Image (cartoon, rainbow, N blue to C red):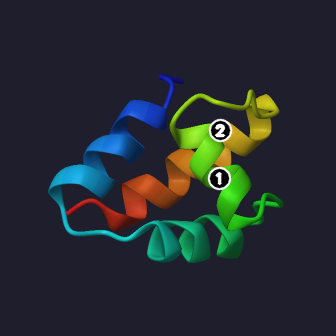
Amino acid sequence: MNDPRQKARDLLEHDNVTLERLWIKYWSEGGTADRLELDAYVHEALKPHPFELTLLDWAVDDLLP
């Protein structure tokens, strides 16, 4: 699996998706991070558990246009 954090940053910057919308989708996939932690994961300020990256990848894929 490729690291989904760049896809998430691109989605947030270019595709009019808010962090809250990304977080809700990530959370509905089973993610455990709160919005602040997810923001830190996406911007590589915190290192998430590998499975959290899988959940982020699923959320991003669902939100891609």
Residue at position x 52%, y 45% in the image = 57
Question: Of 12 and 54, which appears nearest the observer?
Answer: 12
Horizontally, residue 50 falls left or right of residue 14, namely: right
Q: Earlier in the sequence, mark 2 or mark 1?
A: 1
Question: Of 3 and 14, which appears nearest the observer?
Answer: 14
Which quadrant of the view contains residue 45? top right
Question: Of 39 and 63, which appears nearest the observer?
Answer: 39
Residue at position x 72%, y 32% in the image = 46
> Residue 51's x, y, as percent?
77, 38
Secondary-structure class at tag 1: helix
Residue type marked 1: Leu
Image: 55 above or below 50: below
Count residues near mark 1 (Cα–Cα under 10 Å), then give few for <14, some for 14-19, many for 20+. many
> Residue 12's x, y, as percent?
32, 56
Residue that mark 2 sits on: 53
Residue at position x 61%, y 64% in the image = 26
Question: Of 32 and 44, which appears nearest the observer?
Answer: 44
Image: 51 above or below 29: above
